[in-house]
Image (cartoon, rainbow, N blue to C red):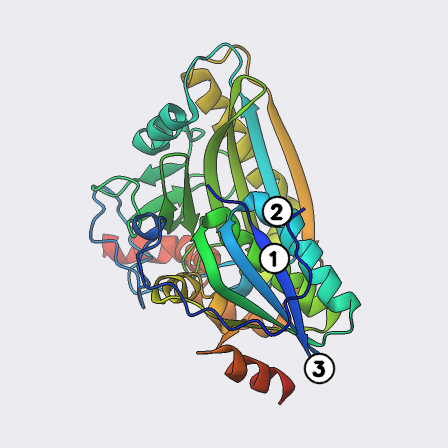
Amino acid sequence: MATTEPTPNREPVPPATTPSRDAANWAKPVDRLSAAGVSGAKVDSVSGKRVSGPLQGFGQLWQKTFRVRLEGSDLTPEQVVAAWKDKFPTFWPKGSRFYAPLAGIAPGEVALLDVAPVPGSPVKLSTGVMVIYADDESFTFMTPEGHTLSAWITFSAFRDGGVTVAQAQALERTSDPFDELAYILGGNRMNNNFWRDTLRNLGLAMGATDPEVEIQVVCIDRKRQWRQARNVRNSATLRTARHTITAPVRWITRRG
Amino acid sequence: MSATTIGLDRQGSVAILRIAGDVTSGSEADLMDGFTRAVDGGARAVVLDFAGMEYMNSGGIGLLVTLLVRAQRSGVRLLATGLSDHYHEILSLTRLDEAITIHADEAAAVAAAEG
């Protein structure tokens, strides 16, 4: 219990002027994102966009926690997080691609990704993330405008009862009304399965025996933010749908 | 790592939560308890005074979102003061400054809260 009693006649304390211990762990604010530090991706739908967190999203606000106990592994939390940063794309389920920044997962870096909107789909949603925070035991991504989710997701590891536990925790809202509808119609479940499979893959790679992923989902705010409905103008989902629908026209045009 | 401490002062209908030490996901109980006491005391606006904050990680910034949602649900305005340039940048980076108005000093924050 650390809440103190009132402090009458207290003189205001000026803000600290010495660098904070966390100073090197945070990205610097940017007005617009640039994915110049990424290679390999066919589509860059992130450059020029702003980051968009839970406050800028449309749908209900969810906190999702995916946790795997690395029973049988003797790796420390720091070792797990280092490996997670280093080999992040390899833990993703098949069908989705993560194009890591050349500089690695570090504060301020931008990564691109292609995600299958439904399992096995040949059509991919192209979007990305910005690394807003990274230290030895955790790192956090924030989504750009146009991503289906306006979110922060933090990947971390810690010790619990003598066992290292790896965790992914998302604070997310869907970005616009169409994304919210897709989320309700199955996107939410797919998203949960995606991170469950990722954590399981991580657990196996870290030497855990038969890793079980524990999932906790809490609705933080049931209200939808209708003032953010205009986010639809940046929607990667609609852009991908338009691209798919017009594919036959482009094919015919190319054939002359 | 130093513990989070939350002090509570009042100026009329404005409560001032003085946040000191390290703010991480482990600070949730202390921060929410402080906010509950502020609102239960009748505050219509809460000024978060960050001058004593020594460290904040991404878990800590996540707590501020949760706090903001609680404040919005309760019809309470959130304001901030005492931010170093570094923490001001973090609120800007995460776009929390679009929902929590930042003031240069406590007097300005209280005046804005009362206005």
Q: Which residue is mark 2?
A: A63
- For the residues marked 3 and 2, what is the alpha-carbon distance in whole angstroms? 35 Å
Work out whether mark 1 precedes mark 3 in sequence or the reverse, and give the earlier one: 1
Disc nearest the viewer among 3 and 2: 3
- For the residues marked 1 and 3, what is the alpha-carbon distance in whole angstroms? 19 Å
Residue furthest to the front? A9
Position above or below: A56 against A168: below
Q: Chain of mark 1?
A: B
Q: Chain of mark 2?
A: A
Q: Which residue is mark 1?
A: B6
Left or right: where B27 falls relative to B57: right
Q: Are marks 1 and 2 in contact (CB under 8 Å)?
A: no
Left or right: where B50 falls relative to A30: right
Do we see residue A76 in this rendering? yes
Quarter-of-image position of residue A52: bottom left
Residue B12: image tag: 3
Q: Position of residue A140 (x, y in %)?
A: 42, 45
Q: Position of residue A35 (x, y in %)?
A: 25, 53
Label 3 amino acid?
A: Gly
